[in-house]
Image (tube, rainbow, N blue to C red):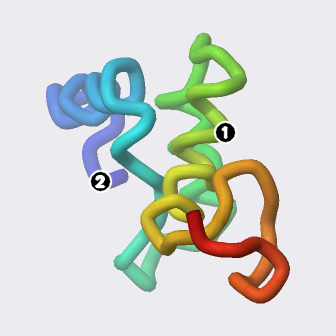
């Protein structure tokens, strides 16, 4: 987020294209608002297939937590896999 257009952007683009089932988005830096995180996500996600976007944006996190990959909600609504 600090270096748009730099080689850091190229480094961040690579996992979006090749490791969509292993990453998820988020921000541990309180100085960035959700709108800024969303804008950077859209930048890196440009041209990716919808299934890759879904994995990175939500499905991977649900899977990492042991929740279902296809729906949202607490574990009580979606049994662990």
- Quarter of the image holding residue 35? bottom right
Q: Where is residue 49? Give x, y as percent.
A: 64, 15
In the depicted view, which residue is nearer to us: 2 or 9? Answer: 9
Q: Quadrant of residue 62?
A: bottom right
Question: In the image, residue 9 lies at what x, y percent?
Answer: 28, 32
Give me the C-alpha separation between circle 2 and circle 1: 25 Å
Depth check: 45 or 35 in front?
Answer: 45
**Residue at label 1?**
54
Quadrant in the picture for the C terminus: bottom right
- Please name which of the two marks, 2 or 1, marks the residue nearer to the observer: 1
Give the image location of residue 38, x and y in percent.
63, 52
Is residue 21 or residue 68 the one in the foreground?
A: 68
Residue at coordinates 43% horizontally, 33% vertically from top-left? 20
Callout 1 crowding tier (Cα within 10 Å): few <14, some 14–19, many ≥20: some
Q: Could you tell me which residue is drawn at 44 percent across and 80 percent down?
A: 31
Q: Are marks 2 and 1 in contact (CB under 8 Å)?
A: no
Judging by the rendered image, the residue that carries numbered circle 2 is: 2
- Counting residues from the start of the chain, the first of labels 2 and 1 encountered is 2
Residue 28 placement, left or right of 48:
left
Horizontal arrangement in the rendering, residue 9 relative to residue 58 (left or right): left
Image position of 9 (left or right of 35): left
- Residue 6's place in the image compared with 75, above or below, is above
Element marked by disc 1: helix
Residue at image x 71%, y 23%?
A: 50
């Amino acid at each position: 987020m600090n270096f748009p257009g730099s080689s850091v952007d190229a480094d961040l683009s690579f996992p979006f294209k090749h490791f969509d089932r292993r990453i998820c988005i988020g921000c541990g830096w309180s100085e960035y608002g959700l709108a800024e995180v969303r804008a950077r996500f859209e930048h890196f996600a440009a041209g990716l297939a919808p299934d890759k976007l879904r994995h990175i944006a939500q499905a991977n996190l649900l899977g990492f937590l042991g929740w279902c990959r296809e729906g949202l909600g607490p574990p009580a609504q979606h049994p662990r896999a």
